[in-house]
Amino acid sequence: MFEAIAFYLFSILTAVMFYITVTTKQALFALTALAAGMIFISAFFFILGADFLGVVQIIVYTGAVMALYAFGMMFFDTTRELKERSGSSLITAGLSILSAVFVVLIFVAPIVSTKIQVTAPLIAGATNSQSVGMVLFTKYLVPFELAAVMLLVAMIAGIVLAGKKMDRSLTLMAEEEIMIAEEANRKVLL
Amino acid sequence: MEIGLTHYLVLSTVLFSIGLLGVMRRKNLLMLFFATEILLNAVNVGFAAISHYYNDLTGQMFAFFIIAIAASEVAVGLGLLIAWYKRHGNINLDAMSSMRG
């Protein structure tokens, strides 16, 4: 009973938050609604007994990814109103529904077939975090290490791409210095 | 009123189609990134549900790796976006036609 109430409550909240994210014109609204939706998603993980996944969802998504987006937004002119694509909304809706049907088929295909089998069963007597650790460091050790290397590569790529000319601080420079630097920058770009 | 696997898969599909709607109608690349995050989250819900109803931890493992991939995608994508914005002054998708043949 309580599970059903929680499921429907969080479903509606998540869907509404994500709908606000994809429809609003204000970047800040979209960011905030997305962060809220991520937290509501973690509620499903807690209902489903995947405690560790829920905690990771809150820490990584709402903690790290959203903070990264918030920092990234400082670089862009987000106050400007954007004119969104004004193409046929009928085509968009049709394509979305078609894609959603395909997703349902993809999900249902293994359920309908009887050949589905458990490859990493739940360990009896262990909490969720313990069993996740046991499976992650035995069966999925190589993907885990690869993911670590991938995160390192992504971090270096982010620093290299975004960190150019970050040795100069605009707040510590005088007005004339900024003008001179911008002139030099424009000449380089031209 | 029992909540089954189908409920979660339908929810996952609804969230996925909301994300697809965002991918199709957004012009601002930052908003496009937000829609991508919604897609990844929708799939994560499906994985966690299957993991729970089949008593199998593989779904949760896949969800972890998806979260790791999403984090690195954000880092590289935002870096590219900032580099583009510094050079061109906008992040409009229609303006990115410099490689058009």
Image (cartoon, rainbow, N blue to C red):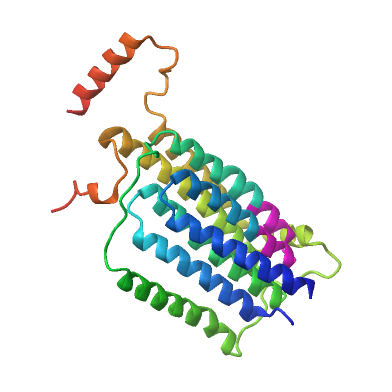
Q: Nearer the viewer, residue B99 or A114?
A: B99
- The stretch of residues the image draws in magenta is A42-57
Q: Nearer the viewer, residue A80 or B91?
A: A80
Residue A152 visible in image: yes
> Vertically, is A156 above or below A27?
above
Q: Nearer the viewer, residue B48 or B16?
A: B16
> Vertically, is A51 above or below A114?
above
> Vertically, is A68 above or below A98?
above
Image quadrant occupied by the N terminus of chain B? bottom right
Query: Does residue B27 appear left or right of residue B51 in this picture?
Result: left
Query: Does residue B95 appear left or right of residue B1 in this picture?
Result: left
**Residue A64 falls within the magenta-colored stretch:** no
Q: Position of residue A181 (x, y in %)?
A: 29, 16
**Residue A54 falls within the magenta-colored stretch:** yes
Say which residue appears at 27% left-offset and 13% top-offset: A180
Residue that sits furthest to the right in the current view: A125
Say which residue appears at 49% left-offset and 57% top-offset: A20
Q: Report the number of numbered marks.
A: 0
Say which residue appears at 54% left-offset and 52% top-offset: A33
Query: Does residue B60 appear left or right of residue A28 in this picture?
Result: right
Instruction: Find residue A112 and report its image quarter.
Output: bottom right
Say which residue appears at 65% left-offset and 51% top-offset: A58
